[in-house]
Image (spheres, grey):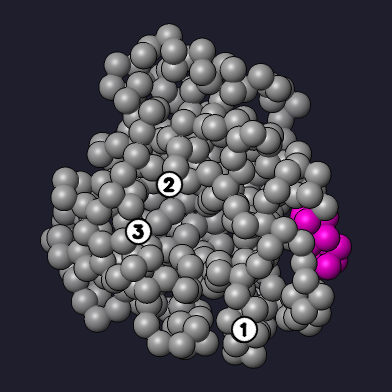
Amino acid sequence: MTPLILGLSGPSLTENERALLRDMQPAGYILFARNIQDPAQLITLTTSLRDLSGREDVPILIDQEGGRIQRMDPPHWPQHPPAATFGAVWQTAPMTAIEAARYHAIAIGQELRHIGISVDCLPLIDVPVAGAHDVIGDRAFGSEANMVASLGAAVLTGLREAGICGIIKHIPGHGRAEADSHEALPVVSARRDELEQDFEPFRKLAEAPMAMTAHVTYTAIDAARCASVSPVVVDAVIRQEIGFKGLLMCDDLGMQALSGSLAERLSATLNAGCDVGLHCSGDFSEMQELAEAAPEISPPACERLTAAMAWPVQSPEILAEAAVRRDELLAAVT
């Protein structure tokens, strides 16, 4: 198995993809709108990925947050609200917001489980500050670290109850970034003590099964390297100070915040201490480059992957009408 989670080019595997993926055996896959047509097609695709890997528990990821980041869209799936909706409810009714956030995650998780997706890139627990780039925006619950942690924990619980593995992102915090890391490298010059606000939600959710790094440079910690390629950030901050012990993946290797070839980027993230690299484009030539460069996944990373995929526990008490219950709670306050 190689330490990669890979995107695909379209709604079904090409013969070239099938041959390459069979040989390289990536740790998992991630799906985007280009891979999705309707429920029947998506079930066929996820089934083919499990069959190809020979692992019933192979991670199949998606970004299904609600709001503007939702890969499974109407008319086949409902439009879900963004995280900021729950943060707004928190201001007047915190417990209602927590309950609604849990039902929100259950509703999404049930949809994912039905079509064979096993991991949602959620919850986003970044804490935005004034002046930050709007790449996070309403994807965040809000600007209060305690609120973000509490609502993030509710989402993580709901996903687990629905039988879905969650990912906390973007560790150790993307909320201060003044640039979109898809396009450029954000540099955060906040003092070390100021960064405690960013770290707090991740510290409180450190028992999460998976986390995704931020392609952000924090000058107070490592001025020369962004978090995803910094051994200082990964070891001293993420692993030790925050206390995260689960599977750590970098954000997309194709983002412009990183430099060098894709092979060099993968090597840098693994050398920094990430367990797996994430590559999203589905470009076949890029996948070939990574396949040639990727080592075997390390034994500790393999153990963390296995533990993460065993983390979900589908509850027999899950409500089929979770989305209805969520919307009733939100309407009662707003």
Say which label, 2 or 1, has the lower sequence index: 2
Residue in the picture at 49% in, 57% down: 211
Which quadrant is the C terminus positioned in? top left
Quarter of the image with the N terminus is bottom right
- Pick the front one: 250 or 72: 72
Inter-mark Cα distance, 2 to 1: 31 Å
Decide: few, some or many residues near mark 2? Use Cα within 10 Å; few <14, some 14-19, many ≥20.
many
Kind of residue sitting beneath label 2: Leu
Task: Identify the residue position indicated by label 2 in the image.
Answer: 124
Q: Is residue 15 magenta?
A: no
Q: Quick one: which residue is furthest to the top in this view?
A: 332
Q: In whole angstroms, how far apart are the C-alphas of marks 2 and 3?
A: 11 Å
| Residue designated by label 1 | 285
Tell me where residue 247 sits by quadrant: bottom right
Q: Is residue 72 left or right of residue 144?
A: right
Q: Contact, CB < 8 Å: mark 2 with mark 3?
A: no
| Separation (CA) of disc 3 from disc 1 | 31 Å
Residue at the image position 48 percent from the left and 46 percent from the top: 69
Q: Point out residue 12 in the picture as x, y percentages from the top left corner.
A: 76, 61
In front: mark 3 or mark 1?
1
Where are the magenta residues, as a range? Answer: 45-55
Pair 2/3: label in front: 2
Residue 11 visible in the displayed image: yes
Earlier sequence position, callout 3 versus callout 1: 3
Indicate which disc, 2 or 3, sits on the residue closer to the N terminus.
2
Task: State the residue in front, 217 or 22.
Answer: 22
Q: Please state which amino acid type lies under the numbered disc 1.
A: Ser
Give above or below for 159 relative to 41.
above
